[in-house]
Image (spheres, rainbow, N blue to C red):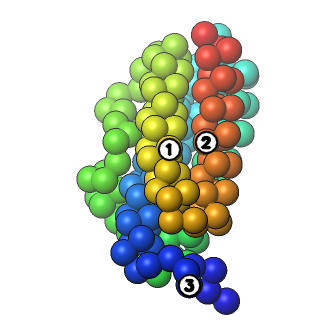
Amino acid sequence: MNYYSDISVEDKTAIANGLIKLLADSYLLYLKTQNYHRNVTAPLFDVMRQMIEEQNTELAHVVDEITDRIWELGMPVPDSHQVYQTLSSIGETVSIPPEVEMINQLIHDHEIMIRSTGTVLTHTHVVNDAITAMLLTQNLRLHRKHMRALRALL
């Protein structure tokens, strides 16, 4: 069943390209979160590891959902870390920062995700792509929830 038959090829391509950028951002945020999870030390060890593990699990799900949506729109899904680095607005961490800096970086990255998601979401509303809009709305909630939890640690 084609859920996108009433959306033009140009709009499908534009939405898919926006989702590909979101995929790149989501994937790099997932990797950063996973790396921080592995490198948390005292005094926030227990609280931060548990929270980051939960966030990482949810981010892995986001990556899968965005990948599925890109495919459903008829676009190939990038499969190269190099492509993701090129497309992403999420900066990679060269060295492991102290926990407070980890938290601040993750908050900043979730803010990037919210802005990027909002841009694609606006386009989905214009072309009446309710399925992608629902996915992106769920992602916005997720990133806002993660930001609140991270800010609470500060």
Tell me, yes or no, if residue 16 can be seen here: yes
Q: Of residues 141 and 81, which is closer to you in this image?
A: 141
The x and y percentages for residue 90 are: 38, 39
| Front of the two marks 1 and 3 | 3
Indicate the amino acid at tag 3. Answer: Ser
Work out whether 20 lies above or below 147. Answer: below
Q: Which mark is residue 140?
A: 2
Q: Which mark is residue 118?
A: 1
Q: Quadrant of residue 21?
A: bottom left
Q: Which mark is residue 17?
A: none
Residue at left offset 65%, top offset 66%: 131
The x and y percentages for residue 114 are: 51, 38
Label 3: state its secondary structure. Answer: loop
Label 2: state its secondary structure. Answer: helix
Work out whether 32 lies above or below 58. Answer: above
Q: Earlier in the sequence, mark 1 or mark 3?
A: 3
Tell me, yes or no, if residue 23 can be seen here: no
Label 1: state its secondary structure. Answer: helix
Residue at the extreme bottom of the image, as rendered? 1
| Front of the two marks 2 and 1 | 1
**Marks 1 and 3 in Cβ contact (< 8 Å):** no
Q: Which residue is mark 3?
A: 5
**Marks 2 and 1 in Cβ contact (< 8 Å):** yes
Q: Quadrant of residue 9?
A: bottom left
